[in-house]
Amino acid sequence: MRIPVIAGNWKMNKTISEALDLVNDLKSRLTNVDDVTIIVCPTFLCIKSVADALGNSNIHVGAQNMFWETSGAYTAEVSGEMLLEAGAEYVIIGHSERRQYFGETNETVNKKVKKALALGLKPIVCVGEMLEDREAGNTEKVVDDHLTNGLAGVSADEMKNVIVAYEPVWAIGTGKTATPEQAQEVHAFIRNRIAELWNEETAEAVVIQYGGSMKPGNVKELLAQKDIDGGLIGGAALKADSFEELAKFNK
Ligand code: 13P
């Protein structure tokens, strides 16, 4: 049985005080949710304050990126060790915005994933096609490339700590959601590939989230699909009322 995972990717939003206002509000709204794993991913700058405010509540903290080295002359980078000490348990790796604007590649994704796993940080690894890939009929090819190369060398045992997020780039921040059928088709493809690359048991255990304009109005339909186990949410995670509805999608 896979426990659904609802995660908010706050991207470059919220100052420390705004972040604290939001999590303090969420903490009281979501106290009774015990059948969904809830994660918030603020900017690096807010992780410590947010994690301290959440304490040992049922809301977990993730980062939006990390570097694979422990420390050293890497101006402006942040290591997994630093994230762990600040209170992060999860880390988003390979988000399409990192790939598009900051030169992230499957190779850098792979280094980050391996380091996160070695430290006990759980990676949320993003995969997904651009509009032109979909239009050219290359969705599976691109998703397979992200999955196979991004997760190369990860063991079946380690895969149980990996979350895969399928985020079609054309659906991110556009209000254009993939239909539940379109998303399910790719999620099933991903689960089959995990079974081929690792094994059946691993494929059954791995949580595969959908991301891209997920909101209270479409969450139920998307999560009703067999292979959609949660959501990685941008815009709708920035407000307490909409994130509450998303985290309570099954109520
Ligand atoms: P939106 O929910 O704003 O479309 O963003 C999705 C996303 O990129 C989450 O990582």
Image (cartoon, rainbow, N blue to C red):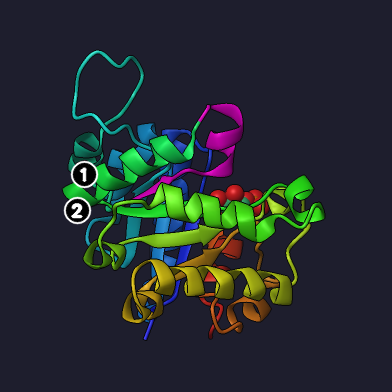
Depth check: give the residue in front, 101 or 47.
Answer: 101
Q: Which residue is mark 1?
A: 84
Q: Amino acid at mark 1?
A: Leu
Q: Which residue is mark 2?
A: 120
Q: How many marks?
A: 2
Please name the residue shown 82% across and 53% down the image: 135
Quadrant of the snapshot with the N terminus: bottom left
Q: For the view shown, which residue lies furthest in the right direction?
A: 135
**Residue 91: in magenta span:** yes
Q: Is residue 48 left or right of residue 210?
A: left
Q: Decide if residue 187 is in sight here.
A: yes
Local packing at callout 2 (Cα closer than 10 Å; few below 14, some 14-19, many 20+) is: some
Q: Is residue 128 above or below residue 46?
A: below
Q: Tell me whether the residue at label 2 lies in contact with that at label 1, contact meaning CB atoms closer than 8 angstroms.
A: yes
Please name the residue shown 61% across and 51% down the image: 142
Q: Looking at the image, is mark 2 or mark 1 nearer the viewer?
A: 2
The disc placed on residue 153 is none
Please name the residue shown 44% across and 48% down the image: 149
Local packing at callout 1 (Cα closer than 10 Å; few below 14, some 14-19, many 20+) is: many
Please provide percent x and percent y for residue 80. Answer: 25, 38
Numbered range of the magenta stretch: 90-103
Please provide percent x and percent y for residue 53. Answer: 29, 50
Label 2: state its secondary structure. Answer: loop
Q: Is residue 170 left or right of residue 188?
A: right
Q: Give the quarter of the image for residue 221.
A: bottom right
